[in-house]
Image (cartoon, rainbow, N blue to C red):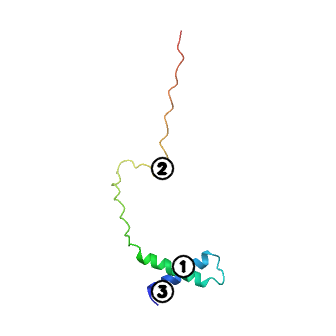
Amino acid sequence: MSVEEKRIREFAYQIWESEGKPEGQEERHWAMARKLAEAEALAPKVTPRKPAKAPPASSDKAKPASNAPAPKKPRATKKPPTA
């Protein structure tokens, strides 16, 4: 069995499972799987990018790993004018 035939079989099985394992839909599932395998074979091969290097960690105080915003400073209140 070739790699392409194995891939078509995998696609057909995934389609069958995703539809709730219905009976009598084999031909449609195999046709869909063939189309998916053909599209996959024609798609350009994309290599994942390497992530950018993180800057070296500071040996001083390390910041806590948190996405929380910094606490806000209280607003200055206006004092009423004195007479």
Type of amino acid under label 3? Glu
Q: How many marks?
A: 3
Measure the alpha-carbon separation of dots 2 and 1: 44 Å
Q: Which residue is mark 2?
A: 67
Q: Position of residue 80 (x, y in %)?
A: 54, 17
The answer to whether any part of residue 15 appears in the image is yes
Type of amino acid under label 1? Met
Using the image as rendered, state which of residue 13 and residue 74 is in the foreground: 13
Measure the alpha-carbon separation of dots 3 and 1: 13 Å
Q: Position of residue 50 (x, y in %)?
A: 35, 64
Q: Position of residue 21 (x, y in %)?
A: 64, 79
Instruction: Tell me: 45 left or right of 29.
Output: left
Residue 5 marker: 3
Q: Single out the mark in the foreground, 2 or 3.
A: 3
Type of amino acid under label 2? Asn
Please give the name of the residue rendered at 42% of the width and 78% of the height, measured from the top-left corner: 41
Decide: few, some or many residues near mark 2? Use Cα within 10 Å; few <14, some 14-19, many ≥20: few
Instruction: Tell me: 51 left or right of 9.
Output: left
Please give the name of the residue rendered at 52% of the width and 14% of the height, measured from the top-left corner: 81
Residue that protrudes farthest toward the top in the picture: 83
Q: Which residue is mark 1?
A: 32
Measure the alpha-carbon separation of dots 2 and 3: 47 Å
Q: Quadrant of residue 2?
A: bottom left
Q: Quadrant of residue 3?
A: bottom left
Using the image as rendered, state which of residue 40 and residue 7 is in the foreground: 40
Secondary structure under the numbered disc 3 in the rendered image: helix
Secondary structure under the numbered disc 2 in the rendered image: loop
The first of marks 2 and 3 along the sequence is 3
